[in-house]
Amino acid sequence: MIELALVLGTPLVTAIILALVGHRRYAAEINAAGSLLTLISAALLTSRIIAKGPMWFYEMQFFVDPLNVFLIALTALVGFTTSLFSRPYMRIEHDHGRLSSGRLRLYHSMFQMFMCTMLVALSTNNLGILWVAMEAATLTTVLLVALYRTPASLEAAWKYFILCGVGIAQALFGTILIYFAAERILGHEGNALLWTHLNSLRMQLEPTTLSLAFVFLIVGYGTKTGLVPLHNWLPDAHAEGPTPVSAVLSGLLLNVALYAIIRCKVLVDGALGTRFAENLMMAFGLLTVVVPAFYLSRQKDIKRLFGFSSIEHMGLITFAFGMGGPVASVAGLLHMTVHSLTKSAIFFAVGHAAQMAGTQVIDDIQGLLKRSPTIGWGLMLGTLAILGMPPFGVFTSEFMILTTAIKHHPWATPILLCALGVAFASMFHKVQGMVFGEPTVKPLAHNPALVPVFLHLGLVLMLGLWIPPYLSDWFRQAAKFIG
Amino acid sequence: MTLAYLTSSAFASQLINLCAAILLLLGFAMLAQRRVLSLINLFMMQGLVLCTSTLIVAITTHQPHLYWSAGLTFLLKVLALPYILHRLIRRLSVKWDIETLLNIPTTMLIGIFLVIIAFNVAQPISLLSGTITRATIGIALACVLLSFLMMITRSKAVPQVIAFLAMENALFFAATSATYGMPMVVELGIALDVLVGMVILAVFFFQIREQFDSLDIRHMEKVHEE
Amino acid sequence: MNAYAILAQLLELATALVMAPILVGWVNQCRAWMQNRSAPPLLQTYYTLNKLFHKEVLLAHNASSLFHSAPYIIFSCMALAAAIVPTLSTDLIFSPAADAIALVGLFALARVFIALAGMDVGTAFGTLGARREMLIGFLAEPALLMVFFTASLISQSTSLSTIVETLAHKEIAIYPSLAFAGVAFTMVSLAENARVPVDNPTTHLELTMIHEAMILEYSGRHLALIEWAAALKLFAYSCLGIALFFPFGIPEASDPLSLTLAAIILVVKLAIGGFLLALIETLSAKMRIFRAPEFLGTAFLLAVLAMLVHLLLRA
């Protein structure tokens, strides 16, 4: 009980404190401390769930099982490392005059608020609250994306708000439809939106309504996940917001939106007994893998490049969950983990690289390795990892996804391989030029925080070589919930 | 006509059907509207109709939480949001005509097709529903799609936001008509989100105008290399 | 079929022929009052018709036989239309023929002839008016058909008599679809009868006129017939509006007592309707001709909405 209260309460309290003192020198430390406390409570919560199994909290409004506790832990971890990274990063931005003290306060406060909304979305048992939390997460990130108040960032934030606002409205309609189907069985006492109740009665839910609901839900939450053709906001939001925000957007928010889809998919599968939801997810997933692969080579902005790469990986994960079955689900969960670790590490490195060059244009960032070997290697290794090179964890999960595809959906394999190949060629070529080559970049004024980069990459490397037994157990349990 | 008939559910469902029809008409009126001020007034009327229909459902079905939600609708959508919007356009002095990306008759025709689609989609669900308001699910969905269309076809920021709010109205109507409303805690959360979103956008408007000297979204579209 | 049905039919036709000019006079009178002008007498249209019937017919040199047969065709179309709209009773000998779609066809036939006659002499005004008339008709007809379809869907028939019987004897209920259809019908009638805001029947301003432009070349008894036909058209549309949206009081039987009662109710309804028409005309300004498509487009939209709303809320 107390663990969940801490997990949800710490970011909220930190956000309130930072709203008051977020512009002071020591605000970054408060931010990091708050995130650390969240991480510790998340770890305690995780150990408790591992020991005791799924649990309900607060009159069953919150529910934690192996599936979401793993995402809660991941969220808390990436949140903590991002707060470490943002300390020097934001200081440099402040010194360059890109951010006033007031904006810094807004940033710190909204960062914690964003963590809070995501943790609520992950831990709630109520599909309505899930929606409310997702919408709140949109609102906080809109503020974060528009932090610089430049024309481009305002445009990106506006696009983000309008597209996700529309998308999430569709998700609300889907939620209403689920409630409508559930109310006929559970009555309108407020229990009819509780996921666990719905899950226990999922065979009785009305199939037509549920299939329609799922279409709305996948379109709605899919907009936030960045599924093609609803992905338009994603590259802009990643490119124009501050880099720590890009890191959490890619690393965490997309996962949370996907988590919402998975929760709904479980219900729909039970009610329909057909592969409707799976096929829909596979179709969306495949499209989302293929389309961005061909956009990658045309990108000139480094953060947009990795934004498109995030879309591609979300497509891969959606495809994996769409295939279903124990192996693919474990692979999907593993890919969620390694992608969010790798991608946030890459954004940390890219953030500093862009600061050194004073621009985000790929052609103007050259020779990172000569000026700062750590940033250069961090970016190179991260890129290799995200492109699926062994021995990193991304390779393991992609390998599992591909082998399952060969076994059950052989027609999709060449498409996937082709898309991954194209992505490899275009991204590797671009990053190679940035890391090697004649330097155009200048050293940084403050020491960059590169511990998070190598911590993440180390974890990804470890997951590629050896998955600890408790972790694999945990993946397997979670995969069982997904089905 | 006796008092018994006036309070019967048959009569109530007729009144709600009337409200639904008016909502649909308002949806089209918003789609056709050329002036921002009238658009806000239409939005306010939409809120009022929504509040009335919720109240009718509350009275007929004796659901106490629906009284609250009708009150909430009134406060938020008839008083607060139109007030904010009015103040906003006065401060920003945007009273000029709305520019549309498609001409209005074409938009209307697309609107009619959307209504037909919505009716077809909602047909199987309406048959399942046991509420006195079941026939209106299709209209609610049609209103959602119409607001969606309005959002796409408008080039200025303020009308886009009004379209967004209208979409939320339609969703709320869908919730009331399909299920007698969502649980109270969810409804409160949604209302809070909408209000906070509106305040954030209001701040945004000023920023956008400061940067672009206009609230025309098309001015924002700088060329992106994609 | 009984003798009363024949009697009622004849009576209805006679009523239409007699009442139509009076209705026009009444509308003009109301409008003059509202605009603070001294009103013309109620029977002014009769005086005009009388004067025109006594005047000599002047024909253009190149006028074809179409030109001098058109007034008779138009007049008979309108008389027939006025006869098949149930006003005094629904038990008429023309009832089986009184189909809503046939009615639209009748109006269309009259429109084609008046447009052809307008172009026949070859003056610029005639052609201009004819083209505008066809534009308006092209937009108004679908809307009118949609209104009829909505009413037909409610009563499961396109026969006007059945529609009126169903609507008049249903228990009181709120029909949002009929309300929409009613507004659409009003808009169509304004356009079809050349009233403000689409056309102004009282002016001869070359830039704006539609109906008047087509009949500039007519004189004498031809003009009288066309004027009378126009009055009949207004009467038919008014009665149609009454039959579709306020059918209460139209009896199914055609015995003398109910016919008398029906006649009194009809006069009251027409008086109110004429007053409202004058009110609309006074309150609105004439719009540019290029706005007319939008006006009629709105009417069409409303009519379609009415149909859709009906399908969803009743099906």
Image (cartoon, rainbow, N blue to C red):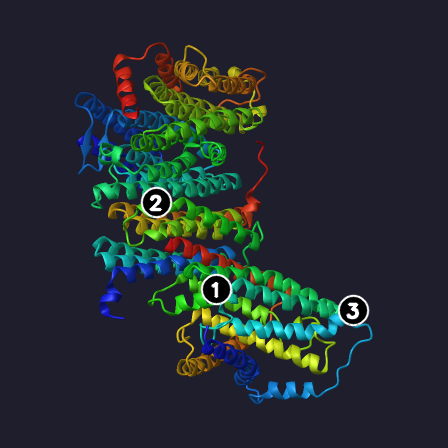
Classed neighbour count for the residue bearing mark 1: other residues with Cα under 10 Å, few (<14), some (14–19), many (≥20)? some
The disc placed on residue C159 is 1
Question: In this rendering, is residue A330 above or below B112?
Answer: above
Question: In the image, B132: left or right of A98?
Answer: left
- Gap between marks 2 and 1, in whole Å? 34 Å
Nearest the eye: A26 or C167: C167
Q: Amino acid at mark 3?
A: Gly
Question: Are labels 1 and 3 on one chain?
Answer: yes
Question: In this rendering, is residue B16 above or below B116?
Answer: below
Q: Amino acid at mark 1?
A: Ser
The disc placed on residue C122 is 3
Question: In the image, C273: left or right of A125?
Answer: right
Q: Chain of mark 3?
A: C
Question: Are labels 2 and 3 on one chain?
Answer: no
- Label 1 sits on a secondary structure element that is loop
State the residue at coordinates (48%, 32%). A228
Nearest the eye: C163 or C313: C163
Residue underneath mark 2: B125
| The N terminus of chain A sits in image quarter | top left
Q: Residue furthest right?
A: C61
